[in-house]
Amino acid sequence: MSFAIRVSAVGGPEQLRWEAVEVPPPGEGEVQLRQTAIGLNFIDVYFRTGLYPAPLPMVPGQEGAGEVVAVGTGVAGLVVGDRVAYQGLMGAYAEVRNAKAERLVKLPKDVSDTLAAAVMLKGMTAEYLLHRCHRVQAGETIVFHAAAGGVGQLACQWAKQLGARVIGTVGSEAKAAIARRHGCDEVVVLPGEGLVAKVKALTGGNGVPVVYDSVGKDTLAQSLDCLAPRGLLVSFGQSSGKPAPLDLGSIGGARSLYVTRPSLHAYTHSREELLESAQALFGVLASGAVKVEAPRTFRLRDAAEAHRALEGRQTTGSVVLVP
């Protein structure tokens, strides 16, 4: 018998319950993992609250790392004892779980389980945002919201390594210092400072080719106003709430703006894309161009406390749950 965090009714952090669960042997194409580290992400909050519907009861969580302890039939390339990590597989908040082998990535020796759980989802998100959703070019100026957050810290460093000038937004002066340490050339504290005016001043009135916005309701209008003609708004989250419906006419005319709502799943749907994204992440970590601060950790059984800290914007960087 092992334990997991389960949600039987959508709602607040109190719905995260530590319960005994039975884990069957791995099925066809599956392996069984003894998990050693589990990543906490805002998407976990969306599922817990019901913003993203899921069948109940559920074990939340989409990111983790651990050791293969059993292998099902039809699995090639993985054996008992292998260290692996994953992102995008619901059910991470567990001591032991079964997982589809095709969605697992073997870990290099220099990537610890804790580091993998801290960066797989966030780092691969940064990879597709900067390389495939919009290919950031040297000399470009970009805006990245929540620059002191888990994705923001990784993405801003990576964008800087690509040669971009990075304007980051944060929610406090304390977070501004963190953003500056992680690749931001300029930092705007919201809601107090005028983001659009700052962007226009820094770009000679032109605006930027791309804005990456994971905040949503509180920032979407400003994000659109920061864009240069034919610029792209990448709306990949909504930590402040769901944005108001967008009037398509407002982004047309002389501005002719583009808007996309991408997901990591769509950009790592195939096994080939998954491996390419993971290898790009491992490569930039190994080069030292992107550095990861030690994540804040909570015991897995204290997941509710971790969710309260995340929703209360009391965290910066990555948070890892330890079984």
Image (cartoon, grey):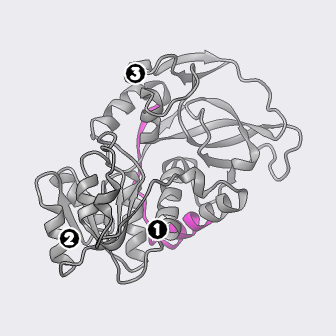
Q: Position of residue 45 (x, y in %)?
A: 42, 34
Q: Secondary structure at mark 3?
A: loop
User: Which disc, if any, is residue 179?
Assistant: none
Work out how far the residue at label 3 is from the one at label 2, CA to CA, in angstroms. 38 Å
Q: Circle 1 — which element? A: helix
Magenta segment boundaries in residue numbering: 279-299
Indicate the position of residue 55 as horizontal and vertical percent values: 58, 24
Give the residue type that dot 2 points to. Answer: Val
Q: Which mark is residue 11?
A: 3
Residue 306: image quadrant is top left
Q: Nearer the viewer, residue 4 or 222?
A: 222
Q: Which residue is mark 2?
A: 199
Q: Is residue 2 left or right of residue 188?
A: right
Residue 130 marker: 1
* 260 relative position to 97: left or right: left
Tell me which numbered mark, 1 or 3, is placed earlier along the sequence. Answer: 3
